Amino acid sequence: MPSVTETVTAEQASTQQVEALDRSTAQPSQVPFSSWGRYPAYDATLVPLQWQSDYPAVLGKHGGMPAGALPVGMGRSYGDSCLLKDGNLLVTTGMNRLIAFDAETGLLTAEAGLTLAQLLDFAVPRGWFLPVTPGTKYVTLGGAVANDIHGKNHHIAGTFGSHVTQFELLRSDGSRLHCSRTDNTDWFAATIGGLGLTGVIPWIQLRLKPIVSRRIDYEGIQFHGVDEFLQLTEQYKDVEYTVSWVDCTGTGKNFARGIFMLGDHSKIPDQLTPSPEPKLVFPMDAPSFALNSATVSAFNTVFFHKQLKPRVRTLQDYEPFFYPLDKVLHWNRMYGKSGLLQFQYALPWESAREGTIAMLNEVAKSGLASFLAVLKAFGDKPSPGMLSFPQPGITLALDFPIKPDKSFPLFDRLASMTLDYGGKLYPAKDARMTAEQFQQAYPQWERFARYKDPLLTSGFWERVTAA
């Protein structure tokens, strides 16, 4: 077991805790546990699940878990939606088996602890790909459903939950519910985007999409300002994958400059092979002074001008297109021991332009800097989940190193501005949202609460539903 001074994530727990705990003889002990943002870190008891029968078994063994419980996968959420202070985290990564696959239709059934990386290793050589993928493949199927993740093709494909056909939901009272668009439809809607609070998902069925190549027909276009970004968004609305990096440190003529990146799966048949394992590792926590406005501004200038031409076209492998950061393990260490905060909003179209400009100005004048600034349009395909985040309009995601005297006040201002512009924040990325902000942006939360499992809770849920 890790020492009491070592903070682990679910990714580490899947290898350390599962090996260390003999469920028949040992009692789990509390360890400091954090999400990918490494803030906050809470003591929790890690309870590994290896088999679908383990969930009711651990409930009986540990006296009903009076401190509450929460299923957790790879811990790649940024805030506290996958944390539970002094509670029991049910680590699902051991439940990662493929159950069935139809090579004609692309229907895949697997246990919820299977990661997207593991799924791709199986599916890509067989000519299939994820219908929706986030910016990391190191998340579980259960986590993808719980957060109803989105990707570069939201304007075409909607959210991950749009491609889930059915799943099983196991409640703490022992009941099992088969959920689909025709069976237990209310539970289906509550669980997709339900932050893991409606029950444990033993298995999920998902419809994949066919591909003939690993490669992406890629194009990168430099733009200057939010208006040019919006013009490109409209111009390329029929391209499957679009996303933009934006320089949030720029001012004057460089304000909101960026690179609009678009791509489609190549139609030229090519060799389909699994991806190699990443070999690069960020070796240590970077010093707190490493990421500052000067260094990030310099990086952004280099990144913007890495394209020697305003427009480039090329074929590239899907790994750097979808998962550029996954090639460096533990890249979150670059933000230092204090961790990072991610801020992500969704603004409706009627206020998207004005609100995005206002908040980029607020960031630029704050003296803080984010070099992982991602700007994208959401489409109008309704999300199937009751608490799903995407809505038609614009989403902006920003990463900042934690500097409480500066970053916390900035986040408070940005959150307030988001609500003023009729938007909402992303629970999977949040560590600061207040109860008032959550309840205003997600008025359906009270309806959702009727479906919450009485045993399950999280740091996020307790914070945003507090009286």
Image (cartoon, rainbow, N blue to C red):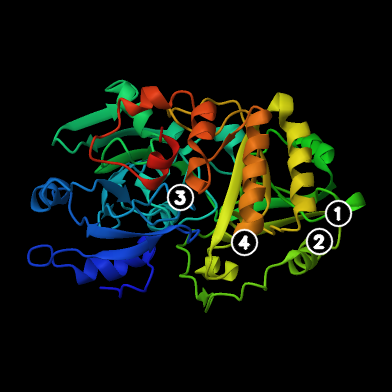
Give the residue pinned by disc 1. Answer: 310
Among the two numbered marks 3 and 1 on one chain, the one whose residue lies closer to the N terminus: 3
Q: Is residue 345 visible?
A: yes
Give the residue pinned by disc 3. Answer: 127
Left or right, 47 with respect to 185, comes to left
Foreground mark, 3 or 4?
4
Left or right, 117 with respect to 90, comes to right
- 2 and 1 marks in contact (CB < 8 Å): yes
Foreground mark, 3 or 1?
1
Foreground mark, 1 or 4?
4
Look at label 2 and name its amino acid. Gln
Left or right, 190 with respect to 59, comes to right
Foreground mark, 2 or 4?
4
Residue 172's place in the image compared with 308, above or below, is above
Which element carries disc 3, helix, strand or loop? loop
Q: Which mark is residue 102?
A: none
- 3 and 1 marks in contact (CB < 8 Å): no
Which element carries disc 4, helix, strand or loop? loop
Residue 328's place in the image compared with 421, above or below, is below
Give the residue pinned by disc 2. Answer: 307
Image spot of residue 39 (x, y percent): 48, 58
Which residue in the rendered view is the most extreme toward the right?
253
Q: Is residue 145 visible?
A: no
Q: Nearer the viewer, residue 57 or 219?
A: 57
- 1 and 4 marks in contact (CB < 8 Å): no
Give the residue pinned by disc 4. Answer: 403
